[in-house]
Image (spheres, rainbow, N blue to C red):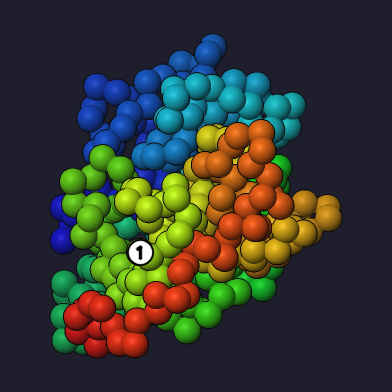
Amino acid sequence: MYESFVKTGHPYKLNEAEDVSPDTGYYPFSSVPSPPSGVAWADVDKVIGGFWWKARFIANDGFIITGTDVQYNLIDSSWTAYHAGEVKPYDCGPCHMTAYKSVGNQEGKPGLIGTWEANGIQCEECHGPGSAHLADAFANEMKIDRSSESCGKCHIRGDVNKIPASGGFIRHHEQWNEMFTTKHAALECIDCHDPHIGLHPDNPDRPQAIKLQCENCHFVEAATFAATTITEHIDSSVTCNDCHMPKAAKSALAAGLYEGDVTSHLWRINTDSTAEMFTPDGKFANGYLTLEFACLKCHTDAEDTKGWAAEYAGDAHNVAATPKKPLISTSISQR
């Protein structure tokens, strides 16, 4: 299980600089080639991330290195700005560290806010101290918290009842904010996810990371979509996720006007052509997906407008083909 877990992104939320240099083979599927221009490895204390989307660098005083070309984006090996002209302490606890305490300064460095036992999210962050269990397994059982709240303590930003947004996208690591607004809030994250198997595109075990597929529960919707009358979707590779879990959030770089780099957990699509994805000030999402993200990220021709998408959205699921009983044998009780 541990060999599988270290292929997830959790252990790499924060890393020592000497571990990250490319010749160490530290990350399972990626590497960080160098610090920002003009910065030597000797000037870097720690690296934030570097596993999938991006990497940022912490100087020896504990402050994050800011500027115009200081964030490394793994998708295209580019460098972009991060809070140029600002002084940014590293105050990312508890979500990037194990056993975080919001007092003091790690290693006595002024920019490192709080103290912690280990970099990244290690086994003990979710399961409790392994040393105590090892000393007396019966008196100190390992913690197993299967609740969504356990995942949500990190996969959240601000008030769980709101979904912060910026620049036309939902901000990253807000899966619990999103899910909390939907009917799926009645489920637990682990009903669908295996937390010990990573979703990185290069992970050969990725197919086993999702324990349930949409059609395991939404068998009627799956059957009606299979009978869609939308020509482009017939015999195509379009999946439930493409429309209901589009990349409406952004961590590093957006792939397009309506495509970020992190999948949404909102699922519900508002097919009204006048529906807005975000509040007027753009600071929050409205708790549903709109046709821009569900449709127009793929349908990009000039005539493919939001109004045009609204005319056809109802045809995505051919209601006339609704089955009277499930068409698949796998049920939620069998998982």
Residue at 26%, 60% (x, y): give it.
209
Amino acid type assigned to the residue bearing label 1 in the image: Ala
Along the viewing direction, whichever of 124 and 317 lies nearer the viewer = 317
How far across and down, in percent of the image, does residue 4 sit? 19, 54
* The N terminus - image quarter: bottom left
To which residue does mark 1 refer? 226
Residue at 46%, 69% (x, y): give it.
318
- Looking at the image, residue 295 sits to the left or right of residue 169; the answer is left
- Looking at the image, residue 325 sits to the left or right of residue 305; the answer is left
For residue 95, above or below residue 57: below
For residue 74, above or below residue 194: above
Along the viewing direction, whichever of 11 and 28 lies nearer the viewer = 28
- Looking at the image, residue 215 sits to the left or right of residue 270; the answer is left
How far across and down, in percent of the image, does residue 219 sit? 34, 77
For residue 186, above or below residue 251: below
How far across and down, in percent of the image, does residue 5 sit? 24, 56
Residue at 59%, 20% (x, y): give it.
69
Along the viewing direction, whichever of 265 and 300 lies nearer the viewer = 300
